[in-house]
Amino acid sequence: MMPKRFVRTLAAALVGGAALFAAGAASAQETAICYNCPQEWADWGSQLKAIRSRLNIVVPPDNKNSGQSIAALIAEKASPVADVTYLGGIAADPARDAGVLTPYKPKGWDKIPASLKDPEGHWFTIHSGTLGLFVNKAALGGKPVPQSWSDLLKPEYKGLVGYLDPTSAAVGQLGVMAINLALGGSYDNLDPAIRFFKELHKNQPIVPKQTSYARVISGEIPILLDYDFNAYRGQYKDMAPVAFVIPKEGTLVFPYVMGLVKNGPHAANGQKVLDFVLSDESQAMWGNAFLRPVFADKLSAEAKAKFLPESEYARAKPVDLKKLAAAQAAIIERYRNEVK
């Protein structure tokens, strides 16, 4: 016969173990893994807090870029880790074609313009941004704020210009195409952009792989090829000495998309997250973070008043996602071989 003390200890251990198991199970049910949902980008920090508060689902922040996310999804295809992913629009069809996404049409699907979603539901746009120059004026050392792409080639900006690596980051690839089209190229002819980046390389640019908002705010990167929403956030939320410039030659408007990962471990939670990012609340939050929500009426007049005038945005044209996706491999190859 076992001593009573041993029995009590064993019983307590079993109860404790059961409680830990139940907590672990509950925790697993309340989790959704998103690839490429970094707190410092596009106000994902506020969205992740809202998802936890409204849905009781914890989505850990993830700092991958679009290329890294797709690479991870493909590598993990036999045993997926993520439930949803957020991608630059250029990566939408490649992710679908790689077989890592599964169709899901969230609430509000029918209101999304046809050009901003996959017809079968593999991906859909949640918001967009306009590419331009995110400038820390105080870090320029008295130099004028550049007003054009060509200004970046001037010797006075040596070591002051940054852009995300086009071999992996969607914003980097968009930068190549925006400059290419602005300088007379086409989706099939990348020569103007390659010439530009070869010249810019002589000016010793800073080329990070990850989102670099904090590095601009601190002045470490005085000029970054980035989106309007990051610049407005710096100007109006962080009260930093920054400005956004739409280059005189023109630029592109770029959508960001989400999709449900095929065979993700928490698929039901992933679906709830995707429903949320198209909800009225979430869409208004994107707008208040200076992104253009896919449902345009959710951009408040107060937020819109902080954007540059519409006359400036007239130089920003919608990107052709299919043509950009078709050019992606050439952008990466030519940049890697001719610029890097």
Image (cartoon, rainbow, N blue to C red):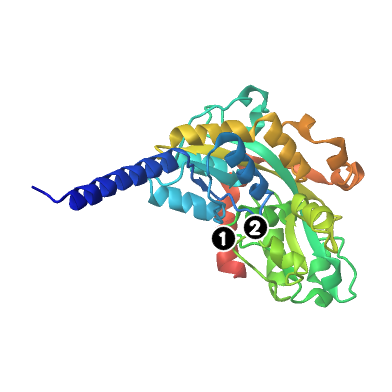
78 up-or-down from 177: above or below: above
Residue at mark 1: 167
Using the image as rendered, state which of residue 220 and residue 180 is in the foreground.
220
> In percent of the image, x 64 and y 40: which residue is there?
50
* Relative height, residue 199 to residue 107 (above, below): below
Q: Amino acid at mark 1?
A: Thr
Q: Characterize the local packing of mark 1: few (<14), some (14-19) or many (20 or more) Cα atoms within 10 angstroms.
A: some
Q: Is residue 170 left or right of residue 10?
A: right
Which tag, 1 or 2, sits closer to the chain's start?
A: 1
Q: Characterize the local packing of mark 2: few (<14), some (14-19) or many (20 or more) Cα atoms within 10 angstroms.
A: many
| Residue 281 x, y percent position in the rendering | 70, 33
Q: Nearer the viewer, residue 272 or 113?
A: 272
Q: CA distance from mark 1 to mark 2?
A: 8 Å
Task: Name the foreground residue: 214 vs 21.
Answer: 21
Q: Hey, which quadrant is residue 253 in on the image?
A: top right
Residue assigned mark 2? 172
Location of residue 278 (image quadrant): top right
Q: Residue at x 91, y 44 (%)?
A: 311
Q: From this viewpoint, is residue 184 visible?
A: no
Q: Which mark is residue 219?
A: none
Nearer to the camera, 340 or 273: 273
User: For numbered disc 1, what is the local secondary structure?
Assistant: loop
Q: Horizontal and vertical percent for residue 195?
A: 70, 65
Where is residue 177 drawn, in percent x and y? 68, 53
> Quick check: marks 1 and 2 in contact, CB under 8 Å?
yes
Q: Is residue 43 visible?
A: yes
Mark 2 is on which residue type? Gly
Picture coordinates of residue 69, whole percent (x, y): 50, 51
The residue under the point 56% across, 65% down is 336
Disc 2 is placed on an element classified as: helix
Q: In which quarter of the view is residue 223 placed?
A: bottom right
